[in-house]
Amino acid sequence: MGPDLDIYAAIERNIARSGQHLFLIFADGETPAFAYTIGNALHGLPELLLIGNYSPRVVGSILNDLGHRMREVRRPLEGEVDVGGQFPVRLRQASAEARGRYTLQAGRFLRHEEYDVLQVLLCDPMGRYPGEPGCEPGYDAPLA
């Protein structure tokens, strides 16, 4: 079995075990870190994308929780969602360009590009989300 097949076998195992697989891509200097799910599209739901240089543990926890909730209610989550912090996360529809730029392995695994992506936004300590005036630079992730 080649390396690519090993990756897809691991993705399949994770989806079978927990409903989705997480990919975490570390920052490269120009592009911030980002993480996304693979597996929700198998249920007709959007994949989730979170962009920003946050703790992998925090990102994984949030994406796993949101993915589980979405699969449980069998519909996409919308707007602001409480994940137990001081402020909710905010979900927004990501662009088709974001799908190609950030969730490349999801399309390869699914063997098509006909899936939606919801971008998960985290706010700064003052409650300002990316794209809002005054959002602290470390939290002002690109809107995909």
Image (tube, rainbow, N blue to C red):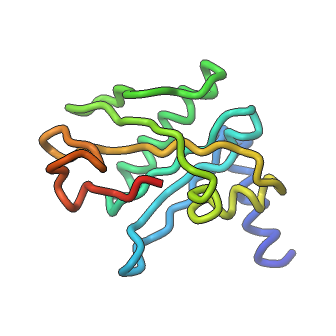
User: Residue 42, percent across and down?
Assistant: 77, 39
In which image quadrant can residue 126 be found?
Answer: top left
Choose between 57 and 33: the one closer to the eye: 33
Q: Describe residue 35's horizontal placement relative to residue 134 as left or right.
A: right
Looking at the image, which residue is at 78% across and 60% down?
9
User: Residue 84, percent across and down?
Assistant: 30, 29
Choose between 111 and 99: the one closer to the eye: 99
Q: Residue extending furthest bottom?
A: 29
Choose between 33 and 133: the one closer to the eye: 133
In which image quadrant can residue 54 be found?
Answer: bottom left
Q: Describe residue 113's horizontal placement relative to residue 70 as left or right.
A: right
Q: Quadrant of the N terminus?
A: bottom right
User: Residue 117, percent across and down?
Assistant: 59, 45
Q: Residue extending furthest right?
A: 1
Task: Judge whether 53 appears above or below 92 on screen.
Answer: below
Task: Judge whether 56 appears above or below 132 on screen.
Answer: below
Looking at the image, which residue is at 59% across and 49% down?
37
Q: Residue extending furthest front?
A: 133
User: Residue 141, percent across and down?
Assistant: 34, 57
Q: Residue extending furthest top?
A: 73
In which image quadrant can residue 4 be found?
Answer: bottom right
Looking at the image, which residue is at 53% across and 40% down?
93
Looking at the image, which residue is at 69% across and 56% down?
106
Q: Number of callouts in the render?
A: 0
